[in-house]
Image: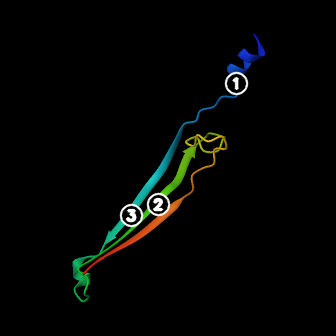
């Protein structure tokens, strides 16, 4: 076999299987009974987190990223507060 054929049939291949948590949200809404003593009618807080974790045996960087360097996506957090009067 030629060296080109050997390159195509490499023993260094590995599985790129992974399980990734892309987004998770947690929301809390105040009980209307708690708000009776205030001017507020509604109160809600929401936390959204992105790119929390990835489970994989892949030895490379991020199997989801298709860039030459394969830098992983950064985590992000968003907190929102909704108040109704």
How many C-alpha atoms fall within 10 Å of the one at disc 3: few (<14), some, or many (≥20)?
A: few
Left or right: 80 with respect to 55? left
Label 2: how many Cα within 10 Å (few below 14, some 14–19, many 20+): some
As drawn, 22 above or below 77: above
Q: Position of residue 17 (x, y in %)?
A: 54, 36
Judge whether 85 appears above or below 45 on screen. below
Q: Are marks 3 and 2 in contact (CB under 8 Å)?
A: no
> Which of the 4 image quadrants contains residue 83?
bottom left
Identify the element where label 3 is drawn: strand
Which quadrant: the C terminus? Answer: bottom left
Residue under label 1: 11
Nearer the observer, 8 or 25: 8
Answer with left or right where residue 36 lies relative to residue 11. Answer: left
Numbered disc in front, either 1 or 2 = 2
Residue to which mark 2 is pinned: 49
Q: Residue at x 59, y 32 (%)?
A: 15
Q: SS at mark 1?
A: loop
Residue at image x 25%, y 87%?
A: 39
Residue under pointer 3: 26
Q: State which quarter of the image contains the N terminus.
A: top right
Q: Is residue 74 above or below residue 36?
A: above
The residue that appears at 57% across and 56% down in the rendered structure is 74
Residue 49 in percent (x, y) is at 47, 60
């Amino acid at each position: 076999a030629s060296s080109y054929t050997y390159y195509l049939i490499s023993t260094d291949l590995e599985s790129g299987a992974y399980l990734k948590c892309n987004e998770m949200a947690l929301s809390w809404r105040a009980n209307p009974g708690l708000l009776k003593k205030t001017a507020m009618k509604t109160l809600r807080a929401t936390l959204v987190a992105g790119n929390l974790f990835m489970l994989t045996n892949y030895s490379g960087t991020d199997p989801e990223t298709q860039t030459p360097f394969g830098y992983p996506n950064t985590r992000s957090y968003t907190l929102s507060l909704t108040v109704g009067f």
